[in-house]
Image: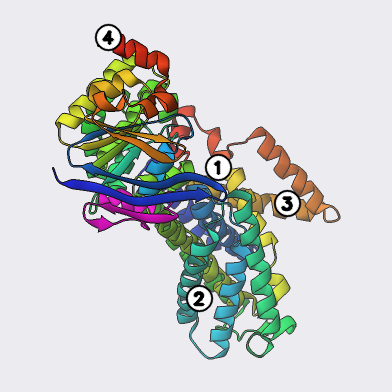
Amino acid sequence: MSEILHLSNVSRNFSGLKALSDVSISVSRGEVLGLIGPNGAGKTTLVNTICGVTPASSGAVTFDGRDITRVKTYQAARLGLSRTFQIVQPFAEFTALDNVAAAALFSQPGESLKSAREEARAHLAFVGLDAQANQSAATLTLAMRKRLELAKALAMKPKLLFLDEVNAGLNSAEVERATKLIHQLAAGGITIVMIEHLMKVVLNVCTRIAVLHNGQLIADGAPRDVIKNPAVVDAYLGQQYAQRNAARG
Amino acid sequence: MTRVNLALLLLIACVASLPLFGGAYALRLGTIACMYAIYALSWNIVGGFAGYPSFATAAFFGFGAYATGILLNKGVPLSVAVIGSLVMCFVLAAALGAVLLRLRGHYFAIASLSLVEVFRELVNNATDLTGGGMGLNIPLASGSGILADATFFFYAMWGLLLITAVVVIIVSASKLGFGLNCIRQNETASNMVGLNSTLYKSIAFGLSACFVGAAGGIYAAWVHYIDPSDVFDILYSVKPIVMALMGGLGSPLGVVCGAFVYLGLEEVVWRNYIQIHSGVLGVLIIMLLLFLPHGLISLRSGMFWRKAKHV
C-alpha cells in the first residue's frame, strides 16, 4: 500500500502547552485509521495541524508527495484533504443543498454554481438527506447536521477524509446508520482517519488504530493488538474494558 | 434576474426622470439621493454580503474626491479623472483590505474607522499636493449655466448609481456573492471548504470602495471646492450603515430604498426643526430600527422577504 499522509516529528505548542509532541505517523491509501485517546489528548489538534488551521510548531507534514506543513486551510482543502467538525459548522441560513454546493463550488476548480448544485444533490442523496435539500441547515436535527457535514466533506472529492467524532451525540440507531455510511465510503476507496470514542464503532470499521495521550503517540497498530496494549488500557480504555474484552475472548 | 432586482432597476430608472419635474433644488436633491444610494449599495457589499461592518466609506469618498480634484487641476478630463479615482480606490482598498479584514467584528469596525482619520491627516499634511487645510479649488467643468451644470452632474451621479447597482446585482448572483455569503455565515467553514476568504474579502472591500471613490470624484467636480473636514466627514461613514439598516441589511433594493427614505427624512426634518434637526432625526432612526428591525424591505409579504433577505 502506498503512503498518502506522513507526519514526521510534528509538535504543536499553544504557548506553554504542548498539545502535540513529536508525533510521527503515516497513513496508507485506502486505510481506515482510528484515532483514539482521552479528552485533551490532542486528537483534534492533530487534524487541525494537518489541515493548516493550527500549523505545526515543528516537524513536517507530507500529503500525496507534497510538503503541506505550511499550507493554508483553503489550499489543503483544494488538495483533497477534507474533514467534518466535531462541533458541526453549517452555513446556517443556507439550505442543505447550498451548504453542500458551497463545498463543491470552492474546492473544485472550474465549478459553476449550477453544476455545484447538481453535484450537491447526489451527495445529499448518498447521506440520505435528499428530502431535506431545500430546508435551511439551522432547522435540521443534530444527526442530520452531522450527515450534512459528511455530505459537504464528500462534495470536496477528498483523497483523505477526517471524521471528527461523527457519532458524538447520536442515538444507537443513528450511530448504526452513520457506521454503515463509513463502511460504504471505505469500500469506495477513500482513505479515512476517524476520531471516535465509541470503541464498538472503532473496532467495527477501522483497519488500524493509533492512540494519543498527552500529545504523544503511545500506540499504533492492528485494532486487536492495540486494545490489549497495557499503556492504552491505562491511559484510555480502563481495566474494566480490558477485563470485559478478555472475558469475551 | 429576480423580481427584487428588477424592482431595483425600475426604481433607479424612475429617478432618472427627475429633471422633467423639478428645478435646480430637485436636481440637487436628486444628485445627493443618487450619491447616498451609491454609498448604501457599496457598503452593502462588505457590510451586508460579507458581514464586515466597515466605517471606511468616508475614507474612500475623500480619497476619490481629492484624487479627482488633483487630476482635474492638472488638466485631465473629468471622465478620465473619475475612472482613475475608481481604479485607484479599488486597488488601494483591496490592498488595505487584505490586511484589515484579518480583524473581525468590532475590531474591524474600529480599524476601518481609523482609516478615515489616517487619510484625513495625510491630506492635511500633503499641503503641496492637496492644499492642506486650506482646501482645494477645482476648475469649473462646463460653465454653461447653473441648470445645465446641475443636470449634467445629476446624470453623472445617476449613471454611476446605475453602474453600481448593476455590479451589485451581478455580484449577488455570482460565485463571489455566494462566497461572501458563506463568509458572513461561517468563516471557519468557508476556509475549510476551500474558499480563499482573504481574497474574497479583499475584492469585496475593493468593490465597496471604488464606486464611493468615483462618487467622491463627481462630488468634487460638482461643488468645485473640497476641504478635508468636508469630504472626510465621519458622517459619510455612518450614514450608509443607517440607510442599510433602515432599508434591510443585505438586500440591494432595500438599501437603496433606505438611502432615499433617509435623505427624505433628513431634508424634511432639517427644514422643519432647524434648531434640533440632528436630535429629531436620531429619534426617528431609533424608532424605525426598533419597530422595523429588518428594514423597510420586510414590509412585504413574508415569503417574498425570505428570498430577498440576503444576496
- Label 4 residue SS: helix
Q: Which residue is mark 2?
A: B85
Instruction: Please provide the residue range marked out in magenta.
Output: A53-79
Q: Which residue is mark 1?
A: B248
Q: Earlier in the sequence, mark 1 or mark 2?
A: 2
Q: Horizontal and vertical percent for residue A169?
A: 43, 20
Question: Residue placed at 15% from the left, 33% from the top?
Answer: A188
Alpha-carbon span between mark 4 and mark 1: 64 Å
Question: Residue placed at 47% from the left, 69% from the top?
Answer: B90
Please tell me whether residue A74 belongs to the stretch shown in magenta: yes
Residue B215's image quarter?
A: bottom right
Q: Which residue is mark 3?
A: B268
B1 w.r.t. B291: above or below: below
Q: Are marks 1 and 2 on the same chain?
A: yes
Q: Which residue is mark 4?
A: A248
Q: Nearer the viewer, residue B160 or A129?
A: A129
Tell me if I can see residue B147 in this picture. Answer: no
Position of B114 with respect to B10 (left or right) is right
Tell me if I can see residue A101 in this picture. Answer: yes
Q: Earlier in the sequence, mark 2 or mark 3?
A: 2
Residue A174's image quarter?
A: top left
* Amino acid type for the residue under numbered disc 4: Arg
Image marks 3 and 4: residues in contact by CB distance under 8 Å: no
Report in which chain the residue with disc 4 lies: A
Report in which chain the residue with disc 2 lies: B
A71 w.r.t. B229: above or below: above
Tell us which disc is closer to us: 4 or 1: 4
